[in-house]
Amino acid sequence: MVGYVTRRVLSAIPIALIAVTACFFILRLAPGGPFDGERALPPTTLANLRAHYNLDLPLIQQYFIYVGRLLQGDFGPSMVYNDFTVAQMLWIGLPFTLMLGFSAFIIGTIVGLVAGALSAVNQNKWPDYVLVFLVMIGLVVPNFLMAAIMQLVFGVYLDWFPAGGWQNGSLAHLVLPITVLVLPHAGRTARLMRGSMIEVLGTNYVRTAKSKGLGQRLILARHAIKPALLPVVSYLGPGLSYLLTGSLVVEQVFALPGIGKYFISAALNRDYGLVLGTTILYMFIILAVNLLVDVIYAWLDPKVRYS
Amino acid sequence: MAGITGKDAVLTEYANRLETLDAPKGRSLTQDAVRRLVRNKAAVLSVFVVGFIILFAFVGPYLLPWTYDKIDWNNIRQGPDFEAGHFAGTDQNGRDMLARIMQGTQMSLIVAGVATLVSVFIGVIYGAVAGYFGGKVDAVMMRFVDIMYALPYILFVIILVVIFGRNPVLLFVGIGCLEWLTMARIVRGQTLSIKEREFVEAAKAGGAKPWTIIMRHIVPNLTGPVVIYATLTVPEIILTESFLSYLGLGVQEPQTSLGTLISFGSPVAETLPWMLIGPAVVLVTLLLCLTYIGDGLRDALDPKDR
Amino acid sequence: MKFTQTLTAVATAGAMALLMSTAASAVTLNMMNGSEPGSIDPHQASGDWENRIIGDYIEGLMTEDANAEAIPGQAESYTISDDGLVYTFKLRDGIQWSDGEPVTAEDFVFAFQRLFDPKTASDYAYLQFPIKNGSEISDGTITDFNELGVKALDDRTVEITLEGPTPFFLQALTHYTAYPVPKHVIEKVGNNWTQVENIVSNGPYTPTEWVPGSYIKSVKSETYWDAENVQIDEVNYFVQDDLAAALSRYRAGEYDILVDIPADQAEWIKTNLPGQDYFAPFLGIYYYVINQEKEPFNNPDVRKALSMAINRDVIGPGVLGTGELPAYGWVPEGTANYEGVEPYQPEWIGLSYEERVAEAKSIMEGLGYTSSSPLSLQLKYNTNDNHQRVAVAIASMWEQIGVKTELFNSETAVHYDALRAGDFEVGRAGWLLDYSDPSNTLDLLRTGIRQEGTMNWGNNYGRYSNEEFDSLMDQASTEQDLAARAKLLGQAEKIAMDETAAFPIYWYIAQNVVSPKVTGFVNNASDIHRTRWLSKSE
């Protein structure tokens, strides 16, 4: 177990390096560059800028310079945001992203599991239909629409919560953005939980338990919940990644700090340094999350072996 | 060519013989499944609604006075107006909203269908192979998935746009090639459990080849989670498409899609509500029905159920 | 129900805490400022959202009044030599940086040298190229910074020498590229001087907090020379890219000023927020460029027909719903130094739209393009609601004259990359004037310069080239008499527009929304509104 975890942690380093390499070269395949704004820069200025960021060197040399710096812990400069280094921007934004993402993850997972289990126990009865309907609304309404509606209804018409912004992490400012993030995650979790729970409830050992006359609660607690969690747990890794990387809309609508938007905007701006920095950071977060998921998986299903 | 065809014939015959051996059980299973699906009222209703939406999208345009790209200069951003033939109003360019909703639904159905098929195909095979072989193969394959997760998705899309230009169907084949990651993880997780079951052990002991075991014993047992996750992938892709169109990487004007229509309708929800309500109702109905069908299928196909 | 009550209670508590924290009496202006600033270093900035912050914390020799006209800022007075080449500025007494260091002439010399230093790689350095040797230092042909035409005669006197007479130079000095920077801080911390722990200001405000992706806060600077007349104590410049969300937040009372509005909401705002709409024309032109290196767009008749078929009257009020005025010429009305020149009108201006279409159609038919054998062209635009609508409308207008238009949108970086590379047929572009002078737009149509074997077309994406136009522009640049200069520029505009060098479509409109609590906000052609002139009642 300890050996397995250590190996996984060590393997993160070559993986991150591969990802950085892939990302570095893919970025340069895309047309346009960081200085292609609305206005043409005079050629001398452009040349100065390119020299400033080493973009005038051969690509392979730029790559080695970048990796060399990276190994010393230097993420380099952003090419669009000049007043901060990439490391500073990520460092400032990360706590917000983590706070938003993890709050939504915890709330969404709990809500999703409970709703999914309730739905499964009442399969094809009215509580099931109602729950599936509610869950699906959360899933199928695009998040930019959900965010705009929430903002208008709860921020403007009812005036219950601030319509946006962020004030020293005050809870009131976080309610709407977290709700927007929670809905689809809870929806997906609930759907998976419902499906796998129904499957488990139909298995022989649960039927046997039933025929032995065990109470429903006891059956659920002892036999059904743990195996039913398996497919859900597989999803939680990607689910958390979605929450962490997919906060762009929420950040934009509610004007929140955070690094979710860099994932998209830096790629669109061709801000090479920031794209790479964000990628590396996400890489490590995702590897950590997946490792955690695999460990939980093993705990839930002892038949899975570490190898 | 002849050689291949000949070999094919042998295989087909062999497969047929296998099927006859299994026949009694298989047939009753299918009948059983259909019977169960029909009993599920929500699923049956959903099948009809989806059928209606498909008709609406593909036949509807022939019944309208306006086409989706025709500008009515006298009716720019007007609400529903039956006299002018704009039953769901017009957009800011004076184009008929109902015609645009129909065209958008067409486009969304096509791209979602294509991309979901591609992603299910890749995801199931990839995940099953990784899970079945386990060990180093699994570790390498899953780390590759991790890397793909971490790379900025939008970068691939920008590059796909450069490669495929503006052909939406090809673009979404490309997007399907990016959307299989989660499917692969789920399938792999399930496979890890399934491969420890008795029937797989038995097949192994009987000397079956890994590929045969994966396709004949593992993949069929994955139907439940796969169908459900596929029904989750459809909304995902429709929403992804709208986000890409919003960023200017998706469907090209004057063509449109449900997601695009909603992304244009959302900021004007108060001032031009007809631009939002129509597409939103179609999208939500469509996705809800797909889910109920997905659930119905899952329940019906599950051999252990009842 | 109980859950809702709890949430409401939490919200109220949060709001209370918020009120408590923003001190009892401080007057805070909350401004929706658009995008995330790329930099608040005046030598690195490039956008109006950066200008709003920078212009509030640094003041140049000249600054803008409430109408955005140039008035003395850090300079108390100035003299201009008779040949229009030497400007001498006398600095005010007692001006200082917010850390108490005096602002000296040396800070200005240092700032201009830093601006042109190739190592700084300033995007907009070229706006100050009228200054002697600025261009040469910037491209590295002169390496001795002392040859720059900016000198400190003593601690309080700055002398600026120009390459040639430049009637708009005082206005150019209000631009952030001409601002001083604190030499004593930069020498200590280098380019990190704009971080809030290092930054000092000589303007009315000092930045004190910066949360990327969220806001920058500036507070009133007590060391500013006119501090007693500055009414607002704190300004928050909020980052907000989503305009629909911005309007919602404005309605929730979270913003006092919106610097832009979502598409289609202009009418709604006028009706529902009466008196809060500050919509006014400002100096900028929205246009399409036509690639004149490609057949058949090198034919002026084709360009003319395409231009005639654009019904500009329907675009502003109808398609965009904001009421932008149709543009036929190249120099926005109200541009300074253009007195005595009639706004350009094409010879077909008197025709009705139907007549224009008929004539355009006959021109196209004469060239063999009809609806059965149409001219196919691709129209490129960068992704944006409004650009898309205009493109859809114009494509439909062109259909009538036998032109089949394929629309092609892409992200900003890709779009402008294609325009610069000449990889387009018709493309969308826009230009907001850097300073109020006709040369600023007319320069967009000058023939490119040959450099190291390749042509550099700069912002002349369509690659329009006319020798007579170029020579008129050259004459104008050395002409000292403003009226004669205006006449030369007017002739140049006429030549280019008669040949339909590009399709002007509409003049931009500034779309500010200002809370009734804020007073002192004046519509002006530059759309610059310094916080110094505003006040706010609670």
Image (cartoon, coloured by chain):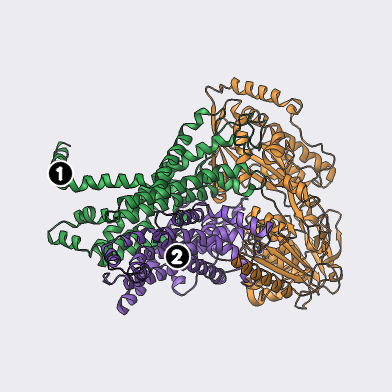
Chain colours: A purple, B green, C orange
Task: Judge the density around disc 1: few (<14), some (14-19), many (≥20) Cα neighbours within 10 Å.
Answer: few
Q: Tell me the number on the disc at residue B133.
A: none
Residue drawn at x 83%, y 67% as measured from the top left: C231
Amino acid marked by disc 1:
Thr
Q: Is residue B208 above or below residue B108?
A: below
For disc 2, the chain is A
Left or right position of B278 against A28:
right
Task: Judge the density around disc 2: few (<14), some (14-19), many (≥20) Cα neighbours within 10 Å.
Answer: some
Nearer the observer, C531 or B115: B115
Nearer the observer, A300 or A132: A132
On the same chain: label 2 and label 1? no
- Find residue B195 and report its horizontal and vertical position in percent: 23, 62
Q: Tell me the number on the disc at residue A114.
A: 2
Query: Secondary structure under badge 1?
Result: helix
For disc 1, the chain is B
Q: Give the spatial CA distance, label 2 vs label 1.
A: 45 Å
Q: Quadrant of residue A231?
A: bottom left
Amino acid marked by disc 2:
Val
Q: Which residue is mark 1?
A: B20
Instruction: Please say whether residue C418 is visible from this viewpoint.
Output: no
Closest to the camera, between mark 2 and mark 1, is: 2
- Find residue B65 and report its horizontal and vertical position in percent: 56, 27
- Find residue C494 and report its horizontal and vertical position in percent: 74, 34
